[in-house]
Structures are given as structure tokens and as C-alpha cells.
């Protein structure tokens, strides 16, 4: 797709020298071409900027950090302040996209102009996750993907690097909350607020890969749980279940990983068939109530 609305891709970076090259190439390699790529630094002291320059390419803008924020909400908001696109996509500095990610999502948003946000499936990878681990495989599990605000409040099913959202809606909400106590759950907080502004959609396709680090904050369940509790108190959430923090036995984790492999194969096969038959983009969304005839 060479025509269509501009998409602003926002990539927050901090000492991402090891991964940013591959991440940028996955953004540049999108089949959807109307992009601006905003790399928002947060005080990197390694060779991150040199790696960005080495990748090159038109439409890449480096945004300097006046000071170290220490949490991804800060550089993401700097990127939002500079963004010009009708839509915004977020890509973490160590994650990857499949080539048709943006093309599929932009088409869904154009065909359904009432949608405020659309997201897809990411598959976890990296040294920090293996078969049988709790974080192995698909995020979200396709059958559990939330498509309305009430279900989303029960637990975050939206990976940040899978999102395409209308910039106008995010701007009206003031972007990400930079409260330090929301670090690592600030994206969930934003998706909750966005979902209350209009319908959201889910595309059951694998549109990228989420890198898991052995020492990453997402691996510290206790910290994640406390920050989720803080979010629940701050926003007055009544439906949040804390389901993602439950301990599961090794047998259950192995069984889930096996089911995940089967689900992954099913998603890949269904996409192959859809593309060969030109069926368009599958989309799940909450059904709107029929207008009253009274």
C-alpha cells in the first residue's frame, strides 16, 4: 500500500544498541509505506544512535532526551508530541513486526471508521522464555482477546507493540500517564482509557514478536502484581481479576505450551488460506447495539 493515511511509528529507546537495528528494519520493511518513524531516546549512553544512523532510510527521526525519564511512558509521550500521523503504532526497541502488520491494521481502521484502536497477536521469543514457561508463545491467547472495555478491564490482553490507535484519541487523553508507580503497566492504563472512547478491534493474526529477557521487569511477577494493584486503586477498577499472576503447575504450563504450538499453527494456516483466497482482514469487535426505531 503506497497510499493512505500517515502512520507514526513511535519507538522508545534506552541503550538498545543490541536490538534496535533489527527492530527498525522490521518497521522500514512494512508493506504499508506511508510511515514516519520516530525514535524517542531516553538518555542512551551506548551506541544506540549510531545503530539508528547505520540503518538509515527516509522518514526516520531521532528525538533527543532533555533528561532521563527512566520509564517508557516518557519517551513515548515525546514521540506523541512530535507525531503527525492520523494513526500511531508503538514498537518497543527490541520487538519485531511481520511485514503486513500495518497494512492489515490500517485497512481494518479504514473499513471500520468508528474503531479507536486495533491490535493483533504477538509471539514471545528470546533467551528469557522457553517451552513450558508461563510467558511462552502467543500474546494474547486469541480466544481471550478483549474487544470491549468491560472485558479488557478484567486483564490486559493488548501487547503494546501490536497496537494501532487513532492519534486524535490518544492526544485527547493526554497520552501515557507518566506516574512512576505505573511503570510497566502504563500501556494497559492507556488502553483502558482509549477503550472507553469507542469500540476496539482484534485481528487474529500473528503480527509480530515480543522479546522476553531473563532479567526484564516483565519477568518479576511480584513487582508486576504490585503495580497492577496500584493501577486498580488509581483508576477504581472493579473487574480486574489478577488472573495473569496466578501460579500454575509445571504440568499445566507444559499443557498450555503444547496448546499454544497448535494455536500458532492454526493462525498461520488460516492466514495462508485468507491471503490465497483474498478474504481480506479477519476482525473481531464488539457488536454495536442496533439503533432504536422508537
Image: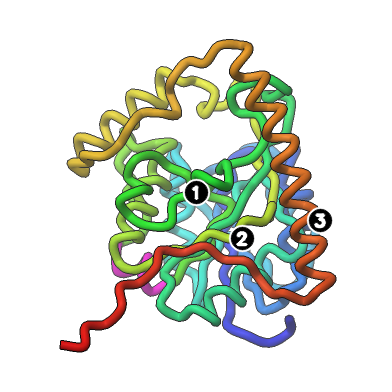
Q: Which residue is mark 2?
A: 62
Marks 3 and 1, how far apart at CA: 38 Å
For label 1, the crowd category at 10 Å Cα-Cα, with few meaning under 14, some 14 to 19 and many 20 or more, is: many
Q: Which residue is mark 3?
A: 54
Quick one: SS at disc 1?
A: loop
In the displayed structure, 230 sits above or below 82; it is above
Looking at the image, residue 147 sits to the left or right of residue 275; the answer is left
Task: Give residue 133's quadrant in the image.
Answer: top right
In the displayed structure, 253 sits above or below 151; it is above
Q: Which residues are magenta?
A: 167-173
Q: Earlier in the sequence, mark 3 or mark 2?
A: 3
Q: Earlier in the sequence, mark 2 or mark 1?
A: 2
Q: Earlier in the sequence, mark 3 or mark 1?
A: 3
Looking at the image, residue 158 sits to the left or right of residue 114; the answer is right
Marks 2 and 1, how far apart at CA: 34 Å
Q: Is residue 189 magenta?
A: no
Quick one: SS at disc 2?
A: strand
Amino acid at each position: 500500500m503506497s497510499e493512505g493515511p500517515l502512520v507514526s511509528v513511535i519507538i522508545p529507546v534506552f541503550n538498545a544498541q543490541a536490538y534496535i537495528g533489527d527492530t527498525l528494519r522490521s518497521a522500514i520493511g512494512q508493506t504499508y509505506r506511508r510511515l514516519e518513524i520516530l525514535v524517542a531516546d531516553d538518555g542512551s549512553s551506548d551506541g544506540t544512535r549510531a545503530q539508528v544512523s547505520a540503518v538509515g532510510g527516509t522518514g526516520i527521526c531521532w528525538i533527543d532526551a532533555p533528561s532521563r525519564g527512566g520509564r517508557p511512558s516518557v519517551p513515548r509521550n515525546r514521540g506523541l508530541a512530535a507525531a503527525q500521523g492520523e494513526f500511531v503504532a508503538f514498537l518497543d526497541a527490541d520487538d519485531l513486526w511481520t511485514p503486513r502488520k500495518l497494512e492489515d491494521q490500517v485497512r481494518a481502521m479504514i473499513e471500520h471508521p468508528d474503531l479507536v484502536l486495533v491490535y493483533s497477536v504477538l509471539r514471545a521469543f528470546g533467551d528469557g522464555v522457553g517451552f513450558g514457561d508461563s510467558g511462552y508463545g502467543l500474546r494474547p491467547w486469541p480466544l481471550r482477546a478483549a474487544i470491549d472495555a468491560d472485558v479488557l478491564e478484567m486483564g490486559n490482553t493488548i501487547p503494546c507493540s501490536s497496537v494501532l490507535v487513532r492519534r486524535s484519541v490518544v492526544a485527547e487523553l493526554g497520552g501515557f500517564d507518566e506516574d512512576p508507580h505505573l511503570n510497566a503497566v502504563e500501556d494497559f492504563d492507556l488502553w483502558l482509557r482509549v477503550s472507553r472512547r469507542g469500540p476496539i478491534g482484534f485481528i487474529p493474526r500473528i503480527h509480530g514478536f515480543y522479546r522476553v529477557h531473563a532479567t526484564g521487569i516483565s519477568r518479576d511477577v511480584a513487582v508486576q502484581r504490585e503495580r497492577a494493584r496500584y493501577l486498580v486503586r488509581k483508576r477504581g477498577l472493579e473487574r480486574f481479576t489478577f488472573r495473569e499472576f496466578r501460579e500454575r503447575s509445571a504440568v499445566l504450563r507444559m499443557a498450555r505450551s503444547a496448546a499454544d504450538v497448535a494455536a500458532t499453527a492454526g493462525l498461520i494456516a488460516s492466514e495462508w488460506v485468507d491471503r490465497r483466497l483474498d478474504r481480506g482482514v479477519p476482525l473481531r469487535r464488539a457488536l454495536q447495539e442496533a439503533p432504536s426505531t422508537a
